[in-house]
Image (tube, grey):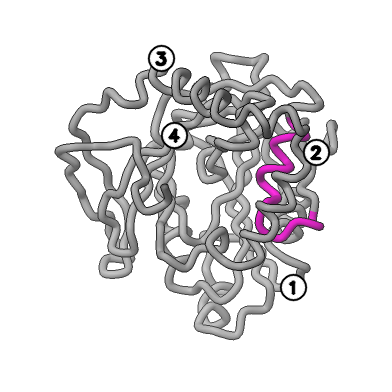
Amino acid sequence: MKFSIVTPSFRNSDWLKLCVASVADQEGVEFEHIVQDSCSDDDTRTWLRGDSRVQAFVEKDTGMYDAVNRGYRRATGEILAYLNCDEQYLPGALKTIHDFFEANPQVEVALAHSLIVDARGNYVCHRHAMVPESRHIWFRFRMLTSSIFVRRKVIHERGIFFDTRWRDLGDFHWARELMKNKVPMAVCNSLAATFTDTGENMNLRANAIREKTETLAMAPGWVRLLRPFWIFQHRARRIAAGHFKLRPMSYEIYTLQSPRERVHFDVAKPTSIWWNRM
């Protein structure tokens, strides 16, 4: 069961190096790492093409989701995923997902959990995955793409690529297409990746805010009217899933200060609340 990991890249050389390292040291699985770089004019061009750990394709695209689609079309693996430059896989992540798919042949999309870290790699919070619910999804989107893995058939047989009309909310609309097509999804109850809250992430920019407003307007009026109720239901689901009963834990990632060796972090009081995104 081979993995194809796609990373869209544009002017993110320092973060991309950490991302590449986190894929390269995965053990116990076969994988390829495809980097779709949109002709970056920063330090990326000095090392990417010569890095044997990746398959680098340097070509102009129309945005992140176009880059991911291009990578998916080139992918040769049975399991596909995309990992942004500011994201990393945790040790053993791909082997865990491999075993999950082998144990659950009916599942086409595996949703694992992620950690949110700051620009220095320090812990911020857990980000637990949940299978999306048709009404909750408009207000609480629990699918972080750093920890989403799909069988090849989802992309190459069902044809569920990303809609490139969206520059920032393509993940949300892709998830809605999964739901419309009744694609079997399940949660793999394991941490797979980290997402770095740099304070400059795309989903904080003006276009993302505009797309969020436009997207919410697409929700049925009666769904918007009952928003407090859906949020309450969603929170109840999280409580039932044990998202707020966390124990001390640790993790290891690459950092800007340590790009060649993973750094160990201990977390005495983990939380499921992303306070600066409330």
Q: Quadrant of the N terminus?
A: top right
Query: Which mark is on residue 240?
Result: 3
**Disc 4 vs disc 1: Cβ atoms closer than 8 Å?**
no
Left or right of 270, for residue 76? right
Q: Mark 2 points at which residue?
A: 160
Q: Disc 4 or 3, which lies upstream in sequence?
A: 4
Q: In this view, does 74 lie above or below 145?
A: below
Query: Which mark is on residue 113?
Result: 4
Q: Disc 4 or 1, which lies upstream in sequence?
A: 1
| Three-letter residue code for mark 2 | Ile
Query: Would you call the spot at circle 1 few (<14 residues within 10 Å), some (14-19), or many (20 or more)?
Result: few
Whole-angstrom CA distance, mark 4 to mark 2, is: 22 Å
Q: In this view, does 202 lie above or below 185?
A: below
Whole-angstrom CA distance, mark 1 to mark 3, is: 46 Å
**Magenta stretch secondary structure, dominant:** helix
Q: Which residue is drawn at 53% across and 42% down?
A: 144
Q: Which residue lies furthest to the front in this view?
A: 225
Q: Disc 2 or 1, which lies upstream in sequence?
A: 1
Q: Is mark 4 on a helix, strand or loop?
A: strand
Q: Is mark 1 on a helix, strand or loop?
A: loop
Which span of residues is magenta-colored?
164-178
Q: Disc 4 or 2, which lies upstream in sequence?
A: 4
| Three-letter residue code for mark 3 | Ala
Q: Mark 1 points at which residue?
A: 59
Q: Which residue is drawn at 70% across and 44% down?
A: 216
Whole-angstrom CA distance, mark 2 to mark 3, is: 31 Å
| Three-letter residue code for mark 1 | Glu
